[in-house]
Amino acid sequence: MKVIAEVKKQGNESGAAIIRRFTKRVQGTKALIKVRADRYFNRKMSTLKTKRRALVGMEKRNTYERLKKLGKIPEKVEGSHVRR
């Protein structure tokens, strides 16, 4: 993204005044709003990656259910949570 915000010194203008005018000009272009919006943008996951992730989850779920049926994993009991 290319934004042109040019400011030139006018007569006896101080450096602070030039910076102030430049800041106002940049705010007028709304460039900062666009940059801040893109800052936390997360790309959408690809379909292949989504499918692979789903397959891994299904496999883990099946393994857990099989171990639970074999009695290798104790079932959760209501009220057995111990606070430390």
Image (cartoon, rainbow, N blue to C red):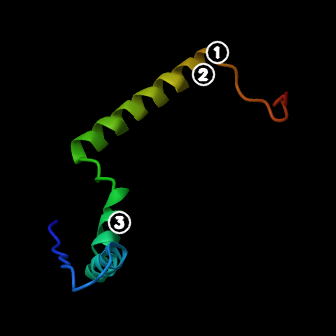
Residue tagged 2 = 68
What's the amino acid at mark 2?
Lys
Which quarter of the rendered picture does the N terminus lie within?
bottom left
Select label 3 or label 2 by which is in front: 3
Residue 24: x %, y % from top left: 33, 81
Select label 3 or label 1 by which is in front: 3
Q: First in sequence, mark 3 or 2: give its number.
A: 3
Q: Is residue 4 left or right of 41 when viewed as pictured?
A: left
Q: Label 2 neighbourhood size at 10 Å, few (<14), some (14-19), many (20+)? A: few
Residue tagged 1 = 71
Indicate whether 35 appears above or below 62: below
What's the amino acid at mark 3?
Ala
Q: Are marks 2 and 1 in contact (CB under 8 Å)?
A: yes
Marks 3 and 2 sit apart, C-alpha to C-alpha, by 46 Å
What's the amino acid at mark 1?
Gly
Q: Is residue 71 left or right of 30 when viewed as pictured?
A: right
Q: Are marks 3 and 2 in contact (CB under 8 Å)?
A: no
